[in-house]
Image (spheres, rainbow, N blue to C red):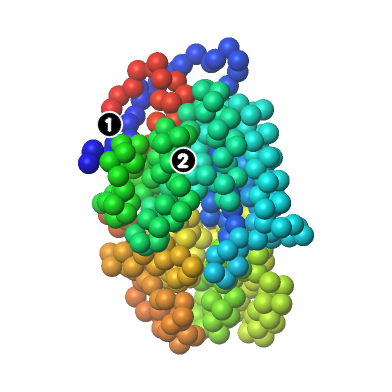
């Protein structure tokens, strides 16, 4: 198997000429069904890429209406698609529109193709799903590859699922064929010394030849422009469950837990949690007086960074937020329909970077005990994990956009 490529740098101070047609154009696609992790990861990448010199224009294609609530950097805009939802076993459906799944997929596919053909990007980064959700990227990828201008990259998080599940899924969805047909590179936002996606899943030499391990994405860059509530006057424990669609039980147990002396509790339920569950939680919190509840905040990063401890699920974006700021955290990983979150959480817990309890085993008593006990040691994260992902993304994007500029290999 070929050696996996690491990220490269380019010569400091290099200033390529601006193309006659105007700034370079980058597009980022995320399908977005459950929670906000894919969107937030792409927004972080867009913000980082805008710091290239010269700064590219960035179009984000998002699969959920909440994308419109997020603050966008200058030079970044978004196309928001009508949303998919998922049921308890992971099957797709229309989230809000009264459309059959095939009708919604066709609507989204036509919108994506029209946008990308008109925008004509120099670089397209597809998040997580090579063919797009329900194959919705196929038309656009075919059109862009036929045009021959865009460099096309697949971006993957550190862990996808169990090896057996991933190998079966990639065969069913013809992902390897998609990579051969449309993609130039695969960027993995992780550290192979923590989880080597290529070897864990026994992917082929052909796949490995496209791979660049970029490192984890340091979320501290988001704080520069974060818009969020004012800092809290007293220490607090934060509980957050992403979009919230499957987080009601965790939130309910959090509202029953005992907080450390002198601490308050802040609960973010997420906009996708059913209204009846939010109402029940609000009533429980009102009865105790040392907690408050937010339905949704587009930028929770200041709340995360300022927390004494955080109780959260184990998605990639949430975990990298916690690790980036060294916040003591208890991870309650989703275990179905995918095992991605628990695989990540188990390895982090084994290194004492986080605490972990499986959600089905969570009780008010063991949550209270964790809050009262010694915290994990997340301040050691940069000794144990490569957190240079954004620098590597910028460096490689620069090389793809401006291939004639001299670079220095790291």
- Place residue 344 in its image quadrant: bottom left
Q: What percent of the width, then of the height, locates residue 174?
A: 45, 47
**Quadrant of residue 279 within the rendered picture:** bottom right
| Mark 1 lies on residue | 410
Image point 68% across, 40% down: which residue? 110
**Coordinates of residue 238 in the picture (x, y in percent):** 53, 69
Residue 295 versus residue 401: which sits nearer the camera? 401
Residue 5 seen by the camera: yes
Q: Quadrant of the N terminus?
A: top left
Residue 16 against residue 26 in the figure, above or below: above
Which mark, by number, is residue 358? none
Which is more foreground, mark 1 or mark 2? 2
Above or below, 254 relative to 328: below
Q: Nearer the viewer, residue 144 or 120?
A: 144
* Residue beneath the point at 35% across and 36% down: 210
Label 2: state its secondary structure. Answer: helix
Looking at this rendering, what residue extends furthest in the right direction? 98
Q: Is residue 126 left or right of residue 113?
A: left
Residue closer to the observer: 287 or 27: 27
Q: CA distance from mark 1 to mark 2?
A: 30 Å
- Quadrant containing the C terminus in the rendered view: top left
- 360 shown above or below 192: below
User: Helix, strand, or loop for circle 1?
Assistant: loop
Please state the horizontal and vertical placement of residue 46, each as a whole percent of the image. Answer: 54, 38
Q: Is residue 236 left or right of residue 400?
A: right
Quadrant position of residue 300 = bottom right
**Position of 23 compared to 347: left or right?**
right
Disc 2 target residue: 178
Q: Earlier in the sequence, mark 1 or mark 2?
A: 2
In the displayed structure, 231 sits above or below 282; it is: above
Q: Position of residue 291 (x, y in %)?
A: 61, 76
């Amino acid at each position: 198997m070929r050696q996996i490529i690491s990220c490269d740098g380019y010569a400091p101070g290099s200033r390529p000429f601006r193309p006659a047609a105007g700034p370079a154009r980058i597009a980022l696609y995320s399908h977005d069904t459950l929670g906000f992790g894919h969107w937030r990861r792409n927004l972080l990448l867009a913000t980082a890429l805008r710091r290239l010199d010269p700064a590219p224009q960035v179009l984000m294609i998002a699969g959920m209406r909440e994308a419109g609530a997020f603050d966008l950097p200058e030079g970044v805009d978004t196309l928001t698609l009508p949303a998919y939802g998922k049921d308890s076993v992971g099957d797709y459906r229309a989230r809000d529109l009264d459309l059959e799944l095939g009708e919604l997929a066709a609507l989204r596919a036509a919108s994506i193709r029209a946008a990308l053909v008109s925008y004509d990007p120099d670089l397209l980064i597809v998040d997580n799903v090579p063919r797009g959700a329900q194959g919705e990227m196929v038309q656009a990828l075919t059109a862009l590859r036929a045009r021959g201008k865009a460099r096309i990259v697949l971006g993957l998080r550190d862990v996808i699922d169990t090896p057996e599940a991933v190998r079966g899924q990639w065969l069913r969805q013809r992902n390897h064929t998609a990579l051969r047909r449309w993609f130039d590179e695969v960027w993995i936002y992780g550290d192979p010394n923590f989880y080597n996606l290529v070897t864990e899943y026994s992917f082929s030499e052909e796949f490995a030849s496209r791979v660049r391990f970029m490192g984890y994405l340091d979320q501290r860059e988001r704080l520069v422009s974060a818009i969020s509530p004012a800092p809290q006057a007293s220490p607090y424990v934060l509980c957050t469950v992403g979009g919230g669609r499957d987080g009601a039980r965790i939130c309910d147990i959090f509202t029953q837990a005992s907080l450390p002396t002198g601490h308050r509790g802040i609960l973010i339920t997420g906009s996708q949690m059913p209204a009846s569950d939010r109402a029940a939680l609000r009533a429980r919190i009102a009865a105790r007086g040392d907690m408050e509840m937010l339905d949704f905040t587009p930028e929770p990063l200041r709340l995360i960074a300022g927390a004494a401890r955080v109780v959260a699920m184990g998605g990639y974006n949430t975990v990298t937020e916690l690790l980036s700021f060294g916040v003591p955290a208890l991870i309650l990983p989703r275990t179905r329909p995918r095992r991605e979150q628990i695989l990540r959480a188990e390895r982090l817990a084994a290194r004492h970077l986080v605490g972990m309890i499986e959600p089905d085993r969570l009780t008010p008593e063991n949550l209270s005990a964790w809050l009262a006990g010694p915290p994990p040691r997340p301040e050691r994260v940069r000794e144990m994990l490569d957190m240079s992902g954004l620098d590597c993304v910028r460096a490689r994007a620069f090389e793809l956009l401006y291939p004639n500029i001299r670079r220095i290999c790291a």
